[in-house]
Image (spheres, helix red, strand yellow):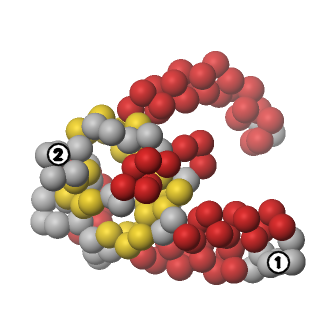
Amino acid sequence: MFYGEYNHTIDRKGRIILPARFRDTCKESGIEKFFITRGLDKCIFMFSDEEWRVQEQRFKGMSFTKQEARSFNRMFFSGAADVAPDRQGRFIVPQYLKDYANIKRDVTVIGVSNRIEIWNSTSWKDFSTNSQNSFEQTAENILNL
């Protein structure tokens, strides 16, 4: 659904713009609203409303008697905010999420199939560079190629 890597700058009003290709996907799929929250590796996860409900059901099924499950759910759901991009695809990310992801000005927005990730551009570049070296080995390990 969402694919690619796009570099943007936060505008003077503190808004991030959804890449045009993602806006086209939203239009085709009838997506008007997203949920954003703390992601892994210090990025921000962005889910369509429908995908958010899928993830919510999945995480609600985790046992609240397990400390790791409680901690994860607290961080994931307490950080959540709903956003509805305007006609130009702009939306505001709450300051606490920008702080979490160390986002100041330059952002990289990537599509990861069922979700969008928003990264501090330097952090994404570092992650991407470091991951390229192990990409084939990781594929072999997780995909049994």
Task: Tell me: 130 left or right of 59.
Answer: left
Say few, some or many: other residues with alpha carbon within 10 Å of mark 1 (under 14 / 14 to 19 / 20 or more).
few
Please, what is the three-letter code of the amino acid marked with disc 2?
Answer: Asp
Is residue 25 shown to the viewer in this render?
yes
Q: Position of residue 66 (x, y in %)?
A: 86, 71
> Looking at the image, is 65 positioned above or below residue 91?
below
SS state under label 2: loop
Is residue 29 shown to the viewer in this render?
no
Please, what is the three-letter code of the amino acid marked with disc 1?
Answer: Ser
Q: Position of residue 20 (x, y in %)?
A: 21, 51
> Looking at the image, is 138 positioned above or below residue 45?
above
Which quadrant holds residue 8?
Answer: top left
Q: Position of residue 95 (x, y in %)?
A: 36, 55
- The image's mark for residue 11 is 2
The residue that label 1 is drawn on is 63
SS state under label 1: loop
